[in-house]
Amino acid sequence: MAMPILIATVSFAGMQFISDPFYEVLIILGSILLAVFALFSSYNNHKNINPMLIFGLSLFLVLPGLLIHNHNLIALGSVFSAVALFYNWQVNRRCENVCCQS
């Protein structure tokens, strides 16, 4: 929901906004918080630990990438984060259709 607002803000602010390391870290940490919230809130539904393990791998790549400012590690960690959230969505959807109906 916040992404359209962020895109609109970036278009008005110019590219200097994105290239500032402070805002880069702020956006990445905000994304991590949202992902953790999504994973933990749906874990109560499906009780599958695999999305969290995949996300843990992504944090293992992103956090050192932030510390040494390596964009390749951050990008690879972001891909694993997206995979974890997609897998979490699939497991949650499957659970709603099959195992969690009372």
Image (cartoon, rainbow, N blue to C red):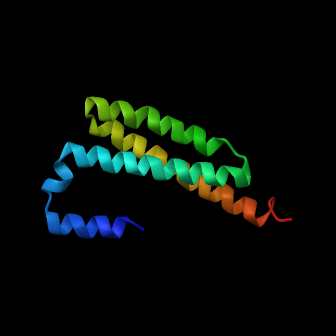
| Farthest-out residue, right | 102
Q: Is residue 23 visible?
A: yes
Tell me if residue 101 comes above or below residue 16 in the rendering: below
Q: Is residue 18 left or right of 67 when viewed as pictured? A: left
Q: Is residue 79 left or right of 85 when viewed as pictured? A: left
Q: Is residue 80 left or right of 66 when viewed as pictured? A: right
Q: Is residue 82 visible?
A: no
At x 72%, y 55%, the residue is: 45
Which of 45 and 62 lies nearest the eye of the viewer? 45
The C terminus sits in image quarter: bottom right
Tell me if residue 58 comes above or below residue 91 in the rendering: above
The N terminus sits in image quarter: bottom left
At x 35%, y 44%, the residue is: 75
At x 25%, y 70%, the residue is: 8
Tell me if residue 5 comes above or below residue 92 in the rendering: below
Count of residue discs: 0
At x 45%, y 32%, the residue is: 60
Which of 36 and 90 lies nearest the eye of the viewer? 36
Residue 81 image point, x, y percent: 47, 46
Q: Is residue 35 left or right of 42 when viewed as pictured? A: left
Residue 59 image point, x, y percent: 45, 37
Residue 58 image point, x, y percent: 46, 39
Q: Hey, which quadrant is residue 70 in on the image?
A: top left
